[in-house]
Amino acid sequence: MSDNGFKDKAKGVGNKIKGEAKDQWGSATNDSNKKADGKLDKVKGEVQDSVGDTKNKDKNNKY
């Protein structure tokens, strides 16, 4: 079974949602560490999303 990038994109969405929640919680509680964790998770999610896009693009270009 080949990886079509869906798994990476799904993980990316999850990390972006988790990151946004941490960022908002950090803002609400004035917790700079939690805000930083949230921003890191959002960046990680963006990278995973891009990896998924690249895999999907590569798969579509092979045929």
Image (cartoon, rainbow, N blue to C red):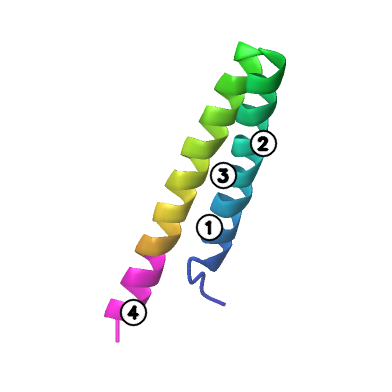
Residue in the image at 63% along x and 50% along y: 14
Secondary structure, mark 2, is: helix
- Tag 3 or tag 4, which sits nearer the N-term? 3
Q: From the viewer's perspective, is 36 left or right of 43?
A: right
Give the SS element for disc 4.
helix
Instruction: Tell me the CA gap for discs 1 and 4.
Output: 16 Å
- Please tell me whether mark 3 sits on a helix, a strand or a loop: helix
Q: CA distance from mark 4 to mark 3?
A: 26 Å
Q: Specify the segment rendered in magenta.
A: 55-63
Q: Which residue is mark 3?
A: 16
Q: Nearer the viewer, residue 50 or 4?
A: 50
Q: Earlier in the sequence, mark 3 or mark 1?
A: 1
- Three-letter amino acid code at the position of disc 1: Asp
Q: Which residue is mark 2?
A: 21
Question: What amino acid type should be assigned to the residue bearing mark 2?
Answer: Ala
**Kind of element beneath mark 1:** helix
Mark 3 or 2: in front is 2
Q: Residue at x 51, y 74 (%)?
A: 2
**Mark 1 / mark 4, whichever is N-terminal:** 1
